[in-house]
Image (spheres, rainbow, N blue to C red):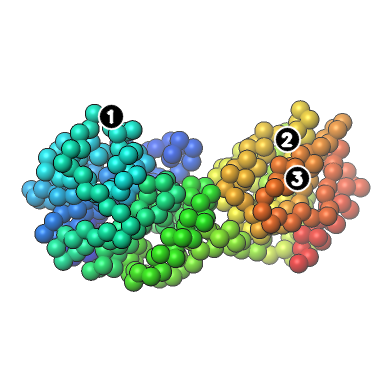
Amino acid sequence: MQNVKLTDAVYYVGADDKTIDLFEGQYVVPEGISYNSYVIMDEKIAVMDTVDRRATDEWFKNLEQVLSGKEPDYLVVLHMEPDHAANIESFLNKYKNAKIVANPKTFNMIPQFFEHLDLEGRKVIVNEGDELVLGQHSLTFVMAPMVHWPEVMVAYEKKEKILFSADAFGKFGALDVDDEWDCEARRYYINIVGKYGAQVQTLLKKAASLDIQKIFPLHGPMLTENLGYYINKYDIWSSYRPEDKGIFIAYASVYGNTKKVAEKLKELLEAKGAPKVAIADLARDDMAEAIEDAFRYDRLVLASVTYDGGLFPCMENFIAHLKSKNYQNRRIAFIENGSWAPVAAKKMKAEMENLKNLTFLNNTVSIKSAMKDADIAQLKALADELLSE
Ligand code: FEO
């Protein structure tokens, strides 16, 4: 994406990345990712964050075009993660009069990434509620610790009522991809920020006192209308409430027998009129999407083969992710398989027992090796319980 004039004074200078193999070292992004960066042109010129080092050249090129020979006064650093902060040093080396605007936690972190960067005389330290006047525009800083790192802050520009929201309201997907916001914003949120629901709730409460007409995040599209829709989604996700009524079946299968059981349950649920049943093969499907679906729906069925007296590794991994993201407030059922000593259900339950407000269903399905006609009754009973309110 070329530089784009977003408002009279604010320009986009970020970049799309459609060749990255794994975003943040673990997430597949089939539609790429955007590293957003903005420039506010006023009496003083402020650049809002840099970009990942994969996009350095494009960012400087976009920046140069917008600056048209002028010198930036400030680089505002809302977030130190390298997908945004990688070019702090090269920016300061290029623009010798520019200063960094950041909070004390950010300034503590900068030397961890840039050992030889001399910030003497180049620091503007801001704290909660501080204002940076650029001319007609000004930025007020609001601390947003753990959304998604401890140093994160957001900035509110009051003339144009823009919230520069850092990672909040971000989304996987390059900007030139025309896809639905919810799906990739949810996968992004649950996996990347999901652990910090309480901190997002705090930020939403602070944001509620601001008159926000535009949200400019660090990834994904700039949000300029219907903001209540996006804020409501963030409220649901960060309060760990299920977003949709539905059943998500996540299975771990070695030879396909546990998979058959999971698929049979799906078939039975649909035959009984379940409005939405999603299913995932934890060994093959995108783990981040499986985690997203576990959070999206109000009921979860875990189906695992017993393996080495425990769980098949992809199920163990899935549950570990759920725990690390503070999974809670859902109804859970278990299906286990085992050829000589099925213990998977017991193991899965033990792993999840300490999570907040989970309701474990009474019916647990236990299969020996392969599903047999006699097992269908167990599955039907589980389907009935899953569909009872
Ligand atoms: Fe997009 Fe937390 O970095």
Amino acid type at circle 1 is Glu
Residue that numbered label 3 is attached to: 349
Closer to the camera in the image, 249 or 361: 361
Amino acid type, residue under disc 3 in the picture:
Lys
For the residues carrying marks 3 and 1, which lies nearer the camera in this image? 1
Q: Which mark is residue 115?
A: 1
Q: Earlier in the sequence, mark 3 or mark 1?
A: 1
- The amino acid type, in three-letter code, at marker 2 is Leu
Distance from label 2 to label 3 (Cα)?
A: 11 Å
Name which quarter of the figure residue 312 lies in: top right
Residue 177 in the figure: left or right of residue 325: left
Give coordinates of residue 110: x percent, y percent: 30, 37
What is the secondary structure assignment of the residue under circle 3? helix
| Mark before the other along the chain sequence, 1 or 2 | 1
Label located before the other in sequence (2 or 3): 2
Residue 115 lies, with reference to residue 227, above or below; the image says above
Residue drawn at point x = 82 percent, y = 49 percent: 364
Q: Is residue 325 above or below residue 357?
A: above
Q: Give the left or right position of residue 247, taking residue 89 as reference.
A: right
Q: Nearer the viewer, mark 2 or mark 3?
A: 3
Please provide percent x and percent y for residue 375. 88, 47
Q: Is residue 222 visible?
A: no
